[in-house]
Amino acid sequence: MQTKTRMNVYFDPDLLKKVEALALRRNISKSAVIEAAVASFLSADASERLEAVFARRMDRIGRQIDGLDEDLAIVGETLSLFIRFWLTITPPLPDSAQASARAKGAERFESFLQTLGRRLATGDRFLRELSRDIESQVSSKSSSD
């Protein structure tokens, strides 16, 4: 039989209540709960498991960031191409048409903001829509080959 050494320690009252509740649920002594907790804390396996969990999380976060980088690059490229296209095909307006064009532009911008708000609220995003369109085009080409 292994002998044990008595040790007096101080606990926060809330922590002690949790220890007591666990001991009651498991039908073991408070000393057994605390001994198991300390052994787990000091175990090399526990730190290795914790490190492995963190490594998996970091890998997942890294992949998510890579996906966001790609999405951001697509958005930037889309916006730049649209602006270049718009600037090259939009003819200058005569002074007499400026006020009317500004009013129509304000109306279209308000419509754009409402549409954007609806799409953001529903979670339907351009990049997801674009990837679905590309996937359907690729699968339709491969099935026709």
Image (tube, rainbow, N blue to C red):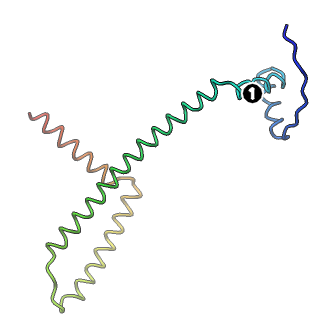
Residue 56: percent from the left, percent from the top? 49, 34
Q: Nearer the viewer, residue 110 or 19?
A: 19
Q: Position of residue 61 (x, y in %)?
A: 46, 42
At horizontal 29% and vertical 54% (from top left) the residue drawn is 74
- Above or below, 54 against 6 in this view is below
Measuring from the top left, give residue 141's x and y in whole percent: 12, 39
State which quarter of the image contains the C terminus: top left
Q: Quadrant of residue 107?
A: bottom left
Q: Amino acid at mark 1?
A: Ala
Residue tagged by mark 1? 37
Crowding near the residue tagged with mark 1, few <14, some 14–19, many ≥20 C-alpha atoms within 10 Å:
few
Q: Residue at x 36, y 58 (%)?
A: 119
**123 over 64 or under it: above or below:** below
**Looking at the image, which residue sits at the far left?**
145
Residue drawn at x 24%, y 89% is: 99
Q: Quadrant of residue 64?
A: top left
Along the horizontal axis of the image, is 3 left or right of 133? right
Q: Position of residue 104 (x, y in %)?
A: 25, 80
Task: Residue 21: name its quadrant.
Answer: top right
